[in-house]
Every structure is written in structure tokens, then in C-alpha cells.
Image (cartoon, helix red, strand yellow):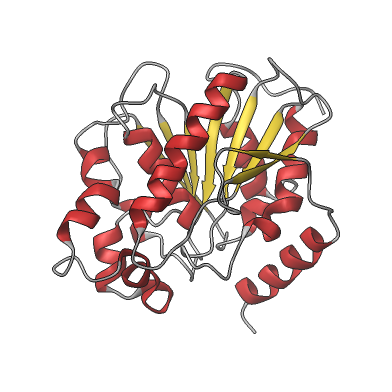
Amino acid sequence: MTAEDAAWERIDAASAAHSPAPLVRYGTDADQVAETYGTGAGAGTPVIVLVHGGYFRPSIDRGHARRLAADLAATTGQQVWLAEYRRIPGDPAATLADLRALDALVRATAPVTAWVGHSAGGTLVLWRACAADLPPVPVVALAPVADLRRAAEERLGDGAVVEWMGGTPSDVPERYAAADPLPRLLAGAADRPGGGVTVLHGDLDETVPLRQSAALTGAPGVRVEVLANAHHFDAYDLGAPAGRALVAALRPRGSAARPA
């Protein structure tokens, strides 16, 4: 068993101890929901949107991220909306439509601090950062699949990207053009007042290799931070260096850390 396998088992077990939080619905499908964490939840309380990973597979839902959502809410004093979304093989457009619907509900409800996504969820929050027709929002991407085309070519996640997209980049180029955040980020799509992207990626990541985030180096409005001696799941522990980097990335720029 690898260190990442062991970490996944710990994360899954810790999250299983958390009961699902109250739901908000942004659509009629069973997956068009978000769990709301935070004792200060209510109108006007800032929201962090947390988008889980799982390589876009229907078999991996938000359950494993409940502990992280609860810990983020407790640490930041803000609401955390743990988002679910449709993960339909061959239909990435459904996933992107869900992000838009969720975004509309969140913005109608409360101020948004940031969108945070891990792994495949990192891909989706990077896409949100690039959506020119939506208001800019800060984004923190944890070990994201930032380059869908390369991920497909390298068959990362045992071909997970090809499965989600419904084909290779040559099979369905229009789907990759619509969903892949990398070309837009390199063109400066995230470089807007009120926006900006922070990417955190461990140098020991075996699930999503660091080269995925390294491809974003130099993109306008994007800061890439390599986490030393960190693997794919280290940011799930807010007491670990990778988790502390996540909390720091959520602070307004220029603010100081609170005393311990």
C-alpha cells in the first residue's frame, strides 16, 4: 500500500464519522446539491465553495470530503458549501452546467470567499476562474488536473479523463475546448480584479503528477506553489504543512495570520 492509498483510507474513515450536513439544492437531480457546514451559516455569512475530486467518476462522491469541509468551516469561521455535481461519463457539459447553476445560487445567497477544488475538483474550479461570463472569484486548486489533453494522452487515473470526456482530444475536440482550463489560463483568463488563482501541488503526488500544475507556471493571475514532501491528499489535514498552506491561501491578500 502506498502512502497515498493509506491517506485515502484515513480520509475516507474520518469523513465517514461525519453525518451529512444540511443540504441546499441548485437543481432537481440528486447530485445537484451542496452540504452546508459552519455554525455561522446564514444569509450574509461568507461562503467557501469546496468541490471534491475523484477523477470525475460517478462512484466517488462528496462523502470523502466531509471532514475537510467541517474543518475548513471551523478554522475559517465561514460557511463551507461542499458541492456535489453530476459526473456522467461522456457528458462533461452536464458537470459544467452544474457549476454554473451552483454559482448562481451561491452568489444569490452570500458573499463568496473562494472556490476550492481538489484533484478533479481542482480542474472544475480552474474552469470557474476562466468563465469570462461569470463574475471573477478567487480560486484555490489543490493538485488539479490542469491539462485535460495531456491527462487524456497519458491516461492518468486509468483513463479517467477520456472516460469523462467520452473520447480522446482527437475524438471530441470540442469537448476538450469547452472544459480544459489550461489554454484559457495561459491566455490570462483568470487575471481579473477580484479573481486570481492559487495552485497548491505536492512534489510527491502520484495520483496527479506535479507536471499538471507546472504547466500553469507563468500564467497571468496564477500563482503555483509546490508543496515539499507532500502527496495527493496532504492538504486534507489542516494541521499539516499542506493544509496550513490551504488555509493561508484563503486569507485575503495582505492580511496577517491570526495568533495561535
Residue at figure coordinates x 79%, y 32% from the top left: 38
Left or right: residue 143 versus residue 175 is right
Left or right: residue 58 versus residue 179 is right
- Quadrant of the image occupied by residue 4: bottom right
Residue at figure coordinates x 23%, y 31% from the top left: 188
Residue at figure coordinates x 43%, y 63% from the top left: 88
Q: Is residue 119 above or below residue 70?
A: below
Locate residue 240, reporting x and y percent: 71, 50
- Quadrant of the image occupied by residue 109: top right
Locate residue 183, reporting x and y percent: 21, 45
Q: Is residue 103 above or below residue 15?
A: above
Locate residue 141, reporting x and y percent: 48, 44
Q: Is residue 89 visible?
A: yes
Q: Farthest residue toward the front? A: 28
Which quarter shows the N terminus? bottom right
Which quarter shows the C terminus? top right
Q: Is residue 70 above or below residue 135?
A: below
- Quadrant of the image occupied by residue 100: top left
Q: Is residue 237 visible?
A: no
Left or right: residue 173 versus residue 4 is left
